[in-house]
Image (spheres, coloured by chain):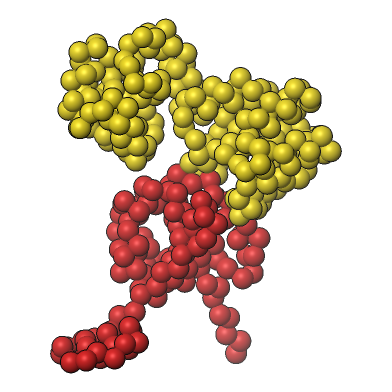
Amino acid sequence: MSLRFLVVDDHALFRDGMVSLLKAAGMQVAGEAGNGQEAVNEARRLRPDVVLMDIDMPVMNGIDATRQITDALPEIRVIMLTISQEDEKLIEALRAGARGYLLKSLNSDEFIKLLHGLEKGEPPMPSSITARLINYIAQQGSYSGAPDGNLTAREVELLGFLGQGLPNKAIAEQLGVSENTVKYHIKNILQKLNFNNRSEAAAYAVRHNLKPKL
Amino acid sequence: MDFIQPLPTVLILAHHSLLSGGIASTLREYQNVFNVRLIDSETINSPETIQTESPAIIILDAGDSDIFQKTPVTQLLEWAPNAKIIRLDLSSDRIRIFSSIELQVTHAVDLVGLIQSLSNTELNI
């Protein structure tokens, strides 16, 4: 018996595409919701097997909605489906009860393949996300008290690469993200540490003995 | 003798875009209206890759940033001058449509006349 899905995203065009993709792959779509509050209501009403949940939505975000759904209906598997690559959101979503984390940058074949794994009890999580999760957990201890400036775990990780003198492209490849994402993190690092350029950040990384965990 | 008009080709270029996969799937529900092709933008390395598809419409996801770095809209319009390019921007629920017009201009006066007609402005020269 195929799984029944509830598709939750505030962009109707994206929802339409997901519904079409799921149906074309032989899966059932129980319903749709445009924000977290609607998702909670529809999950109670429709009792789907799986909720595909966006994170950033109006009215109620996907993480709060996940917490409410999994508290009230623990048999429903909530899978985050988001553009967010921030480690904090990944961790927060899993703590809220999410059973998988998929990125909207997946291609449709990978996406469907990962969802088919659900039928065998495999949590849908691309290997790049799993690796980041392991890194994040592993780095929690070594991060404490190292750099100041309220850097996120990801930013500290990136500082380690800057200290090694790696260019953005190489860092992006190591982290499995786009160059634009690397630039975004570097901009935040410079702002938080009040540096003028990446050389200052690299020198800081060397001084603090920050090294990438490979 | 019956002449069968070929269906217009909608070419969706994507690399990191689930949105594009969803759009392709949705449009394939209209297979008697469009011929839908979803191509990994990373495989486009020459004009021929686009030209052999002879697309009427090219669809790009604004969030798929790698595409715009590798194959800018102007480049695509040079390769497929008759195509219209639709750029989907999910963040604002809008689309932007790009197309190109090629005209021969040999003298400055032709250019001035063209600018006048395009800008709909009387130039005081």
Q: Residue at x 28, y 19 (%)?
A: A160
**Residue situated in front as seen by the camera: A89 or A7:** A89
Q: Residue at x 20, y 13 (%)?
A: A207
Q: Quadrant of residue A41?
A: top right
Quadrant in which the C terminus of chain A appears:
top left
Q: Position of residue B42 (x, y in %)?
A: 37, 48
Q: Is residue B80 above or below residue A21?
A: below
Quadrant in which the N terminus of chain A appears:
top right
Q: Position of residue B44 (x, y in %)?
A: 35, 54
Q: Position of residue A212 (x, y in %)?
A: 30, 17
Q: Residue at x 32, y 56 (%)?
A: B71
Q: Which chain is red?
A: B
Q: Is residue B31 left or right of residue A147?
A: right
**Residue situated in front as seen by the camera: A73 or A150:** A150
Q: Which chain is yellow?
A: A
Can residue B101 be seen at all in this image of the molecule? yes
Q: Is residue B102 left or right of residue B3?
A: left
Q: Quadrant of residue B28?
A: bottom right
Q: Residue furthest right?
A: A45
Q: Is residue B2 left or right of residue A175?
A: right
